[in-house]
Amino acid sequence: MSMISCVICNARIAFDADYCPKCGTKDPSGWKKKKLFYSSLIGLTVFIGVGLYIWLVEWPQLQHILMK
Protein backbone atom coordinates (compact mmCIF):
# COMPACT_ATOMS: atom_id res chain seq x y z
CA MET A 1 0.00 0.00 0.00
CA SER A 2 1.39 3.37 -0.92
CA MET A 3 1.86 6.10 1.63
CA ILE A 4 1.16 9.79 1.06
CA SER A 5 1.18 12.97 3.14
CA CYS A 6 -2.00 14.48 4.55
CA VAL A 7 -2.88 17.69 2.71
CA ILE A 8 -3.48 19.49 6.04
CA CYS A 9 -0.85 18.29 8.55
CA ASN A 10 1.64 16.38 6.32
CA ALA A 11 1.37 13.19 8.42
CA ARG A 12 2.21 9.96 6.56
CA ILE A 13 -1.00 8.02 5.83
CA ALA A 14 -2.21 5.29 3.50
CA PHE A 15 -3.35 6.49 0.07
CA ASP A 16 -6.91 5.20 0.52
CA ALA A 17 -7.36 6.32 4.16
CA ASP A 18 -10.81 7.65 5.05
CA TYR A 19 -9.41 10.16 7.56
CA CYS A 20 -6.08 11.33 8.93
CA PRO A 21 -5.39 9.80 12.36
CA LYS A 22 -3.36 12.87 13.39
CA CYS A 23 -5.65 15.79 12.46
CA GLY A 24 -8.92 14.00 11.62
CA THR A 25 -9.27 15.43 8.12
CA LYS A 26 -11.77 13.45 6.05
CA ASP A 27 -10.36 12.22 2.70
CA PRO A 28 -6.83 13.48 3.46
CA SER A 29 -5.50 12.53 0.04
CA GLY A 30 -8.27 14.30 -1.89
CA TRP A 31 -8.62 11.11 -3.96
CA LYS A 32 -12.34 10.60 -3.36
CA LYS A 33 -13.15 14.18 -4.31
CA LYS A 34 -11.16 13.82 -7.54
CA LYS A 35 -12.82 10.49 -8.30
CA LEU A 36 -16.28 12.04 -7.87
CA PHE A 37 -15.32 15.00 -10.08
CA TYR A 38 -14.00 12.83 -12.91
CA SER A 39 -16.95 10.44 -12.70
CA SER A 40 -19.33 13.40 -12.97
CA LEU A 41 -17.35 14.83 -15.86
CA ILE A 42 -17.49 11.53 -17.76
CA GLY A 43 -21.23 11.22 -17.10
CA LEU A 44 -21.87 14.75 -18.33
CA THR A 45 -19.79 14.13 -21.46
CA VAL A 46 -21.75 10.97 -22.26
CA PHE A 47 -25.06 12.77 -21.65
CA ILE A 48 -24.10 15.66 -23.96
CA GLY A 49 -22.79 13.24 -26.59
CA VAL A 50 -26.03 11.25 -26.66
CA GLY A 51 -28.04 14.47 -26.80
CA LEU A 52 -26.00 15.78 -29.73
CA TYR A 53 -26.31 12.45 -31.55
CA ILE A 54 -30.09 12.48 -31.18
CA TRP A 55 -30.35 16.12 -32.20
CA LEU A 56 -28.00 15.95 -35.21
CA VAL A 57 -28.63 12.42 -36.52
CA GLU A 58 -31.95 11.02 -35.37
CA TRP A 59 -34.11 14.15 -35.20
CA PRO A 60 -33.71 15.14 -38.90
CA GLN A 61 -34.64 11.59 -39.93
CA LEU A 62 -37.69 11.64 -37.66
CA GLN A 63 -38.79 15.00 -39.04
CA HIS A 64 -38.44 13.66 -42.56
CA ILE A 65 -40.70 10.70 -41.72
CA LEU A 66 -43.29 12.88 -39.95
CA MET A 67 -43.50 15.39 -42.82
CA LYS A 68 -44.62 12.74 -45.35
Image: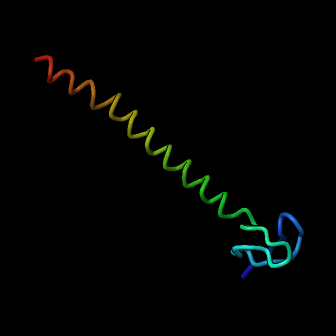
Question: Eyeballing the image, is 13 above or below 54?
Answer: below
Question: Eyeballing the image, is 51 above or below 62?
Answer: below
User: Which residue lies most toward the top here?
Assistant: 67
The residue at the point 89 percent across, 70 percent down is 10
Q: Horizontal placement of 48 versus 39: left or right?
A: left
> Looking at the picture, how far across and down is residue 62, in whole percent?
20, 27
User: Which residue lies most toward the left here?
Assistant: 68
Give the quadrant of the C terminus.
top left
User: Which residue lies most toward the bottom here?
Assistant: 1
**What is the tally of numbered marks visible in this picture?**
0
Q: Horizontal placement of 44 versus 23: left or right?
A: left
Residue nearer the viewer, 35 or 50: 35
> Looking at the picture, how far across and down is residue 16, in whole percent?
69, 74
The residue at the point 75 percent across, 66 percent down is 29
Q: Quadrant of residue 19?
A: bottom right
> Looking at the picture, how far across and down is residue 51, in whole percent?
39, 36
Q: Quadrant of residue 66?
A: top left
The residue at the point 34 percent across, 29 percent down is 55
Give the quadrant of the N terminus.
bottom right
